[in-house]
């Protein structure tokens, strides 16, 4: 008789956002008169439509697919040259970051890559994550059998090093102890969920730590387009020595509205090698070629359009729209007496729940009393308890309405 992968059975409960969706559905069923009135600022899904230049690129590519002379079949394993070159020329070269087109792997999104990248590392590799943390980093390693035993009491895995991100350290983790034995370090800046950012000196310290201790940094830069402070780094490859210790993951979802179109990429430098000199780029290429048939041609052409002069202008306007939402939420709640952070160089606002209310209690209170949905901070890890995440990706009306309703509490 066959058996299931027991590592999946170790996962506690459902995926965070599945749990939230179930709670909203149950509330709507019990209160059908209020269901249509719910303001959703929980899941970080965009609401602005695709920019006109991107839509035109999609239409043009569809027309190509309808003509035998220009039809495209399977995409190249790493992605089309036109997109990989555009990525290098626009995302890295202008910032002095040394990245080459053959180190760029185009995929169907950052979530997939952040979950799958762990496959090229040894089964006994110890991971370190910020706390609170995007759940995919931990859950994918649970599925791989790398995290040890789970404690219901503490919410922690025995073989995971947790790096608390608290108000005291500005929600940016401190470097781990030198003897922690860490192999893989997950960092995300601008951060999901806290909205915190990291300056160049602190990021350089992480790179130096990783090189000194033989660790690799998985750097999630999905929200880099929201950085407005010119002093802040957009890529880990702006730091000296990062090519020998870091993988960077990026997404087209938040900077260009591709949440429903699906496109992202991961950079694995040729200089990144394990203790035996194995090139991790080659392992990722092997994994990519075996398990992935490439993002669709029409979507990659749309991705290329993001880097056109008009595309950059249009998507930049959308980013400014969302950041105005962030300003409205941040300043509105602060004026109402709430303790909030983030929302300046990031599209997430991190709210401290009032009067010792737990994260899920505050979730229930908002949903039941004023029909506003956010994300409980405890869903991102133990250090998220007592906090609540709100997203700026809604409409302008939803941002304004949410602030007024939360004030009414």
Image (spheres, helix red, strand yellow):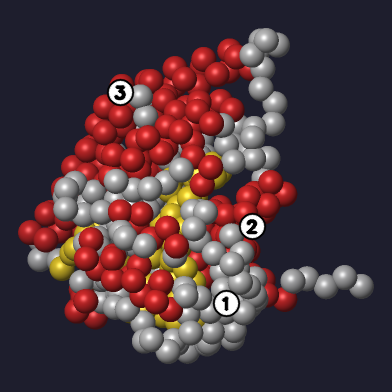
Q: Which part of the image, by quadrant, shows the N terminus?
A: bottom right
Q: Which residue is mark 2?
A: 283
Cα distance in 3D space between marks 3 and 1: 43 Å
In the picture shown, does residue 148 fall above or below 299? Answer: below
For disc 3, the neighbor class at 10 Å (few under 14, some 14 to 19, many from 20) is few
Q: Nearer the viewer, residue 346 or 271?
A: 271
For the point 37% across and 20% down, which residue is it?
52
Name the spot of residue 11 as percent of width and height, x first. Answer: 60, 74
Q: Nearer the viewer, mark 3 or mark 2?
A: 2
Name the spot of residue 254 as percent of width and height, x first. Answer: 37, 43
Q: Which residue is mark 3?
A: 309
For the point 56% across and 73% down, which residue is it?
275
Using the rendered image of the protein, determine whether residue 185 is visible from the camera's viewpoint.
Answer: yes
Question: Are dots 1 and 2 in contact, CB under 8 Å?
Answer: no
For disc 1, the neighbor class at 10 Å (few under 14, some 14 to 19, many from 20) is some
Q: Which residue is mark 1?
A: 125
Helix, strand or loop status at disc 2: helix
Q: Nearer the viewer, residue 59 or 87?
A: 87
Tell me the quarter of the picture where residue 334 sits.
Answer: bottom left
Q: Which part of the image, by quadrant, shows the C terminus?
A: bottom left
Q: Earlier in the sequence, mark 3 or mark 1?
A: 1
Name the spot of residue 77 as percent of width and height, x first. Answer: 64, 40
For the point 59% across and 84% down, which residue is it?
148
Is 101 on the left or on the right of 93, as rendered?
right
Tell me the quarter of the picture where residue 106 sits.
Answer: top right
Q: Nearer the viewer, residue 321 or 115?
A: 115
In the picture shown, does residue 329 fall above or below 321? Answer: below
Q: Nearer the viewer, residue 116 or 259?
A: 116
User: Which residue is at the far front?
Assistant: 277
Tell me the quarter of the picture where residue 206 sits.
Answer: bottom left
Helix, strand or loop status at disc 3: helix
Is 329 on the left or on the right of 116, as rendered?
left
């Amino acid at each position: 008789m066959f058996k299931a992968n027991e590592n999946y059975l170790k996962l506690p409960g459902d995926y965070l956002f599945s749990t939230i969706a179930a709670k909203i559905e149950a509330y709507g069923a019990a209160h059908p008169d209020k269901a249509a009135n719910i303001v959703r600022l929980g899941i970080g899904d965009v609401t602005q439509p695709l920019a006109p230049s991107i839509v035109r690129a999609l239409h043009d590519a569809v027309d190509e697919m309808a003509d035998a002379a220009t039809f495209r079949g399977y995409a190249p394993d790493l992605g089309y040259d036109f997109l990989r070159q555009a990525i290098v020329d626009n995302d890295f070269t202008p910032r002095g970051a040394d990245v080459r087109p053959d180190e760029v792997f185009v995929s169907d999104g950052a979530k997939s890559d952040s979950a799958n990248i762990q496959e090229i590392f040894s089964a006994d590799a110890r991971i370190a994550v910020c706390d609170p943390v995007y759940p995919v980093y931990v859950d994918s390693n649970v599925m791989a059998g790398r995290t040890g035993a789970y404690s219901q009491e503490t919410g922690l895995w025995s073989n995971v090093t947790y790096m608390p991100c608290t108000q005291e350290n500005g929600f940016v983790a401190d470097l781990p102890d030198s003897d922690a034995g860490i192999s893989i370090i997950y960092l995300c800046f601008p951060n999901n969920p806290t909205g915190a950012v990291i300056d160049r000196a602190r990021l350089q310290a992480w790179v130096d730590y990783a090189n000194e201790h033989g660790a690799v940094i998985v750097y999630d830069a999905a929200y880099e387009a929201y950085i407005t402070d010119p002093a802040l780094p957009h890529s880990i490859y702006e730091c000296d020595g990062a090519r020998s210790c870091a993988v960077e993951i990026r997404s087209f979802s938040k900077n260009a509205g591709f949440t429903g179109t699906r496109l992202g990429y991961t950079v694995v430098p040729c200089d990144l090698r394990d203790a035996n000199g194995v090139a991790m780029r080659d392992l990722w290429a092997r994994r990519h070629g075996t398990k992935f048939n490439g993002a669709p041609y029409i979507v990659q052409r749309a991705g290329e359009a993001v880097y056109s002069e008009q595309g950059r202008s249009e998507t930049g306007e959308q980013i400014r729209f969302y950041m105005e939402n962030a300003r409205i939420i941040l300043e509105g709640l602060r004026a109402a007496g709430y303790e909030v952070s983030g929302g300046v160089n990031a599209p997430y606002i991190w709210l401290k729940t009032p009067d010792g209310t737990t994260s899920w209690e505050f979730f229930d209170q908002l949903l039941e009393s004023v029909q506003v949905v956010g994300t409980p901070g405890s869903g991102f890890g133990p250090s998220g308890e007592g906090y609540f995440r709100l997203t700026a990706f809604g409409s302008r009306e939803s941002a304004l309405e949410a602030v007024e309703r939360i004030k009414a509490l």
